[in-house]
Amino acid sequence: MKKIRIYVGIAILLTACLGAWAQQAADEKLFQEAKLLIFDEKWEPAQAKLEEFLDKYPQSAFFPQALYYKAKCLEEREKDREALAAYKDYLRLKDKNKNLAEDAEGSVIEIAFKFYEKGDKSHLGEIEERLESPRKVVRYYAAIKLSFVKEKDIASRGIPILKKIIREERDPELTDRARIALFRVSPETFSGLEERTENKARMLRFQVYDNRNKKLEVTISIPWALADLFLSAVPEKERQNMRAEGYDIDRILKELQSSKGTLIEINIAKEGKIIKIWIE
């Protein structure tokens, strides 16, 4: 009798294990089918598969990934409000993947900025909030993205992080992006920072005067090695104004490079400005 009970117990245990294995195989199969569709960039059918998976297998080990990929499908389909909600649902999970979580945070920032560009400023808080993220990558991306915001009081909230990137990071691509962002938000801050951190580097000096009272309005100093960053930060409208006055900024910088110390003055009559550029 005792042996029979043991055999029955083993049978029940094996049945339970086989049932769990069968469910695991079924959920993994459905999840992999969805991932193949994602790989082929078939976002709508992939989303349908993932939603089926999420309904059928809420306890599956693949559930967090499926939720992330559903958000990705929604983002690719430009269903921004739904995508934002799905990413935030994923980020609330305790067992989320670190790398996927960073990607999700980046997508939240991107989508929030898209809303801002369409005139909805209410989502800027999503970007500002991520300036305090425990993930360094997220903080950095939020600060750089915030630099594109036209409202300077908001954009300037990322300045401390941009300074930290420039001072402490060693990745040249990252520090260059931070320099451009800081220059975009606050040229004066950028100039002062560069003067403190650069040692004996050739510097591009850039001054703007009011042509009416000759008052100095802006002074910018950046390492000559970063002149290409300066060019990328000059608004196209200003470039057009300069070309209309007969000045090509790319040609001017080539002239400066060929002769250290040469001073070039540009009189932009329509704007009432005088620009002085030289290298020292």
Image: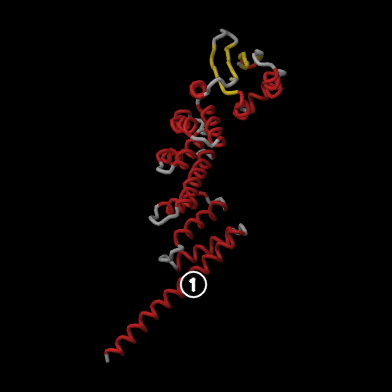
The answer to whether residue 233 is left or right of residue 256 is: left
Q: Nearer the viewer, residue 8 or 130?
A: 8
Instruction: Tell me if residue 2 comes above or below residue 249 in the rendering.
Output: below
Residue 93, image x, y percentages? 40, 55
Q: Judging from the image, what secondary structure is the residue with disc 1 in? A: helix
* Res. 38 visible in picture: yes
Give the residue furthest to the top: 213
> What's the residue at 44%, 74% (across, down)?
21
- Residue 90: quarter of image: bottom left
Which quadrant of the rendered structure holds the C terminus? top right
Residue 41, image x, y percentages? 61, 57
* Res. 269 visible in picture: no
> What's the residue at 48%, 33% (across, down)?
165
Q: Nearer the viewer, residue 75 or 265?
A: 265
Residue 233, image x, y percentages? 59, 28
Residue placed under numbered mark 1 in the picture: 25
Which amino acid type corresponds to the residue marked 1 in the rendered image?
Ala
- Residue 274: quarter of image: top right
> What's the residue at 43%, 66% (across, down)?
60
Q: Nearer the viewer, residue 244 or 119?
A: 244
Instruction: Tell me if residue 123 comes above or below residue 168 in the rendering.
Output: below
Give the residue furthest to the front: 200
